[in-house]
């Protein structure tokens, strides 16, 4: 995933497991200049009978509860897109966390 996102540099800084808010989101895509969009990605694997939808809900709650968008707000990113992505083998689902730009 990070290898694919590396193509966004130097307009964006792509960082993995870096502190933001009250935790460490899986990936942050931070614009080099304020006023450009920023992205938080929280990746989840659906294992042990956990459904994709349940994994997505956990990812969205984790983004919200830990305020993962804090670094992007501080950097002046706008808008901020926060996404949970759940994998089950080759099946992938994504969902957007509402109000990611709000504290």
Image (cartoon, helix red, strand yellow):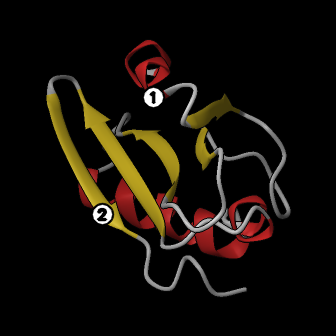
Residue furthest left as drawn: 91
**Which residue has dot 1 on it?**
8
Whole-percent x, y for residue 61 in the image: 55, 71
Return the x and y of residue 65 as percentages of the image width and height. 69, 74
**In front here: 76 or 64?**
76
Q: Nearer the viewer, residue 88 or 93?
A: 93
Q: Quadrant of the N terminus?
A: top left
Residue 9, position as x, y percentages in the image: 54, 25
Specify the quadrant that holds the C terminus: bottom right
**Residue at image x 41%, y 58%?**
83
Question: Residue 70 at x, y = what percent?
Answer: 76, 67
Disc 1 and disc 2: Cα gap in Å? 22 Å
- Mark 1 neighbour density, 10 Å: few (under 14) some (14–19) many (20 or more): few
Residue at 37% over, 35% down = 48
Is 35 placed above or below 89 here? below
Q: Quadrant of residue 73?
A: bottom right
Residue under numbered circle 2: 95
The number of numbered badges drawn on the structure is 2
């Amino acid at each position: 995933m990070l290898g694919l996102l590396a193509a966004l540099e130097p307009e964006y800084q792509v960082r993995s497991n870096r502190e933001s808010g009250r935790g460490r989101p899986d990936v942050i895509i931070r614009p080099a200049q304020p006023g450009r969009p920023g992205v938080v990605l929280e990746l989840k694997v659906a294992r042990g009978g956990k459904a994709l939808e349940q994994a997505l809900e956990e990812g969205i709650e984790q983004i919200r509860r830990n305020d993962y968008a804090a670094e992007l707000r501080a950097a002046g990113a706008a808008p901020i897109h926060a996404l949970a992505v759940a994998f089950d083998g080759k099946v992938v689902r994504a969902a957007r966390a509402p109000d990611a730009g709000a504290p």
